[in-house]
Structures are given as structure tokens and as C-alpha cells.
Amino acid sequence: MPKPDFLSLLETSHPILADGAMGTMLHQQGIGLDTCFDHLNLTHPATVGTVHQAYIEAGAQVIYTNTFGANRYKLGDHGLEDQVEAINRAGAELARKVVEASFKDVLVGGDIGPLGVRLAPYGRVLPEQARATFAEQIGILCAAGVDFLVIETFSDLYEIREAVAAAREVCSLPIVATITFTRDDRTLLGDTPAKVARTLHETGADVIGANCSGGPAQLRRILELMRQAVPEARFAIKPNAGWPENVGGRVMYSAGPDYFGDYTKTFTELGVKLIGGCCGTTPEHTRIMRARLDALPADLQIQVITPFDAQAAHDRVQLEPTQLAQKFSRKEFPIAVEMDPPRGLSAHKILAGASLLAEAGAAVINVADSPMARMRMSPWAVCNLIQRNVGIETTLHFPTRGRNLLRVQGDLLAAHALSIRNVFVVMGDPTSIGDYPDAMDDYDLVPSGLIRLIQQGFNAGLDHAGADIGQPTAFFVGCALNLLPSNPERELKVLRRKIENGADFALTQPIYQPEKAFEFLQLYEERFGPLEIPILAGVLPLFSARHAAFLHNEVPGIIIPAETMARIEAAGDNAPAEGVQITIEMIRKMKPWANGVYMMPPFGRYDLAAEIIEAL
């Protein structure tokens, strides 16, 4: 019986189901991440074959060869550039043998990934060199008997165009071409889903789409934008199982098989022709997706897409709310922990502390900006390091003091480019109290004005002068709040102004009198109705009697009750433990009216913060 034709299968009512991750499965079998996975076609063919077989048994109609990185450049990183032909031929033949042994009508896609080097004008590899390298690998795969070609996980439109062109020169097999996107729904080089779709369609690829990236939710958004740009195209979608997280030294993915199964119907209704999984997915994901596809009615209606009329509409990008915003909307009780940037070059200690807090259950790390006007590492760099290395979301403290209007806007663009989207707008400490008392201390915006600039300017796609910044930002903006003010009328007025200008949430100073803090909220409600924004109530665990006395007597706005002072003094050497217990008690008292906690660990004692988080 002849094998089904790939292009003919695309015309069936339901999507073709492709396999899931190869690398994830190989790593689960003990293969190190620094291993050349493609070389396993020669050294461990049975291991690779077992993965292919598992996906076929789970119901995949298509499997991809284990040749994603089998080009001359990537193999050269492992000293294997002279084995391009042997590795690619073995990968294709191995996949075909597993299919034949299964006695199922499964097609084999020849998998081609990016070269791992930058093309001109962003790198030194010329387009003709890239095309020749792709042609070498593709020619071998075609000769070895693959049924179609998969050109996937590219981030550079220049590079993927050369790969598709090489495929058209070498053979006549059908081509699937897919791009990967960053967290802001653009490629690494800043291209929008609409531009990607138009470019891929113009190359002549038979199927276009997206793979890898984040989870199904992100690729659903991207798919809708791509379809609106090129509604006549065929689309392929293979999402990761969510964004990878480092948990206890292991790379983990959060999107499970049932979640993927739920999205199978969604993608079918959006007209996808080829569906599968990428990094973090397993045969169990494939099995659930197979069952959901088989249960769909044959006459399931495909959503009609209306093309955009204007170029600007093609390039619109809608970002998901930040994780902190989502926790507030789900009525969770997130705990944010403040960390100060290091005074020197080394970030090892702050990363270790962030890892401890993330493992304990902190929702977000707040990174202060030059606290007490003392010189420290840029908080932008620290936020980026924490998010990349620890995998926990951050909130950037954004003082207006010391910045003119040009720098404020440039810094906002920098933060968003680094995927830092929670910002805490605050006046900042005067330079007169810090290391450089004669340093410039001017500012063009007060906090409420900066909140307005972000919400009504940047988040609408415009700078302060009304010029287009390319795409709207998606900042989640916090403001400062004093729940125990010496002048309640003034604090009410300032808070109203911040909320009217667009503040999304508030962070308070350290609270040691939860009942009195609640009185301010009651006063606000009497005047204006229930507070419109969530509150992260500030807590600073007391460390010693001396520490408590300093806060009470020298820090404006902090009042520590006599009973609390007495408990700390009586604790003696056990004051840190007593301070932890007092903090836990206060948080429990604040839970009825607070929406979360903003914790400031004393003297960098992140272990105390972790203890409090775990106790809660």
C-alpha cells in the first residue's frame, strides 16, 4: 500500500499530528546537554530509535529526523564537521527503519535547524555561504528518503530565506518553515508575527508557522496574527511546554499533557494543518493530543480570519500580563522580596539569594536602585541576570530623581527590551545622604507624572513627545503608599493622583501596626469607595533590639509598638527568630485587607525571608 502524500494529508479536516521533543527525551535517558545529539545517530542509534518509536506508538503521524543541528557549522563545534553526510544519512535511515517496523503510515520529516552563526549584516557568514551549507545537509536528507523537509526554530528571517531557497534548489519535497519568538512575541531580531508570516509565505514554503517559543497560549496569539497577515497560507504550530525554568539544577517545563490536549481543539479551530510539541513535550503529550484530535467532530468549523487593512495593524503585538499581574487577578497572595544590587562586579551572591527565595516560593524579586543613594550595580543588569539565571520574575525600582526626561524614556525602553515589565515608580533617595552628596539630584518628572508617561504614553506606543516607539510597551506599574502617614489628607490626595494616572498596584513602607494601617484604607473607602488597586504590604523583619530602635527613631514613617519592642529586647540573642515570628503574625493579620506582601530582608538575610515564606 503506497505511503500517503504529505501535501494531500494537509487537506484533511483535522491537523496532522507531529511528534514532540527529541532532545528532552534523550536528556531524560541520561544524555548530557553538552552532547552532540545528532551524533547519537551513529553512536547510540537504539536510543534515538526508541524515542521515534515512542512517538509513533503515542499516535504521531509525522516524526522528525534527529538532525536538527547536523549542519557543518554546528557539528564543527564538536569537531564533527567531516561527518555531515554520515550523521544526516544515519538520522534519515534510522527514522525510516523505525517507521517500517511500526507497520504504520507515518511520514518522516527531514529536520533542519539554524546554523548557529549569524548571517551578514549581523554576522560574518555571507548569505551564499549559508545557502551552500543548507544545501549540503538538505541534499543528504533528500537522498536518504525523507518525505518532506522541516526548517524550524529559526530566529533570523535572512537565514531562513536562505534555507528555503537551498531546499528549492536541491529537491522538490514539500517544505515546512517555522520561526521561534521571544517573550515579547517578536523574533530575536525584532520582527513581528505578521512580518514573519509574509516573509515565509513569499519564500514559497508549503507550510509556515511557529515552534519552540513559549507555551500554547503564546503561540495561539502569534498564530492569530500570522493568519491575519496571510490568511491563505497553511500553518504549523509546535509549542514548547511553557518557558523553561531551572529547578534544583534541572530544566523543567510547566505545561503538561492535558493542557496541550485542551489547546488541540483551539489550534484546530484556528485552521492549523500541522500540530505537535517542541522542547519539554513527551510521548504522553502526543498521546493526549491524539485522543483529543480523534474526538473532534469531522465538521468542526474553522474560525474565519479577516485580513488587516493597514500595515500598522499587521504589526500589533499583545503581550500577556506579567506573572505578578496574573497572580493579583487570580486573587492569590504573592510575596515579593527586595534585594539590593551588589556594590562591585560580582553578582554571585545575589543570584544565590534569588535562587533560595525562588525555591522557598517567592513570586517576584524587587531590585532596588541605588538604595540610600549609594553606588551599586545597575538594577537593570541585576533584574536581567536574575530572570535569565534563576527564572523568577523581577520588579525594577524606577526612581525619578537624578534622571532627565531623555534618560527616563531610554531606561524604560531598555527595561522592556530586557523583558523587565514590572516597574515600581518612586521618587528615590536624595544624593545628599549617600556616597556622592554633590552629585546631580534634579528630575523632570515626579512619580505620578512618570506613571502617566508609562501608562498613557509608552503603553500606548508613544513617547513623551507623541512619537511612535514602534509598538506599545506592557509595563505593570507600581506606586509607593504610606499606610501610616503623618498627614493622611496629603497621602490620600497623592494616592488618588497616582491611581488616576494609571498605577496598577501599590507597595507600602514596612508596617508594624496592621490595625492602624487598615484604618487608612477605611478612610480611603469612605472618601472614594474601595481601593481600586492591589496592595503589597511592606514587612521588614526585626533583627535585634538595636535594629528596632534605629527603625523606630530614625526612619520616617516607621512606628514600632512598645509591645513589639519589648518582645525583641526580651529575645536577646534569639532576636532574629523572634523577628521572624512577629513578621509571620503581622502578615496573617494583614491578609484580610492586603493582596500580597513586600518583604525587605534585614542586612541581606535572605534565609530569614525564605523561612517566613515557607511558614506562610
Image: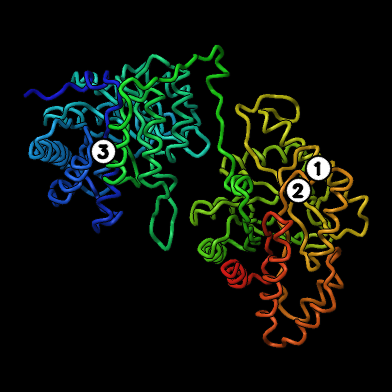
Mark 3 burial class by Cα count in 10 Å: few <14, some 14-19, many 20+: many
Q: Amino acid at mark 1?
A: Lys
Question: What whole-number distance in Å separates the C-alpha atoms at marks 2 and 3?
Answer: 47 Å
Question: What whole-number distance in Å separates the C-alpha atoms at marks 1 and 2?
Answer: 7 Å
Question: What whole-number distance in Å separates the C-alpha atoms at marks 3 and 1?
Answer: 50 Å
- Where, by quadrant of the figure, is residue 117 drawn? top left
Quadrant of the drawing holding the C terminus: bottom right
* Residue at mark 3: 19
Q: Which mark is residue 166?
A: none
Q: Residue 2: image x %, image y %? A: 8, 23
Mark 2 burial class by Cα count in 10 Å: few <14, some 14-19, many 20+: many
Image point 67% across, 56% down: which residue? 596
Placement of 354 over or under 301, stated as above or below: below
* Residue at mark 1: 498
Q: Residue 232: image x %, image y %? A: 39, 14
Query: 142 or 482: nearer the eye?
Result: 482
Query: Nearer the observer, disc 2 or disc 3?
Result: 3
SS at circle 3: loop
Q: Amino acid at mark 2?
A: Cys
Q: Which mark is residue 479?
A: 2
Q: How many marks?
A: 3
Query: 444 or 273: nearer the eye?
Result: 273
N-terminal of the two: label 2 or label 3?
A: 3
SS at circle 1: helix
Q: Residue 54: image x %, image y %? A: 20, 45
Query: 287 or 235: nearer the eye?
Result: 287
Q: Are marks 1 and 2 in contact (CB under 8 Å)?
A: yes
SS at circle 2: strand
Q: Amino acid at mark 3?
A: Asp
Evaluate whether residue 315 shows in this view. Answer: yes
Image point 84% across, 48% down: which residue? 525
Compared across the picture, whether 195 is left or right of 569 comes to left
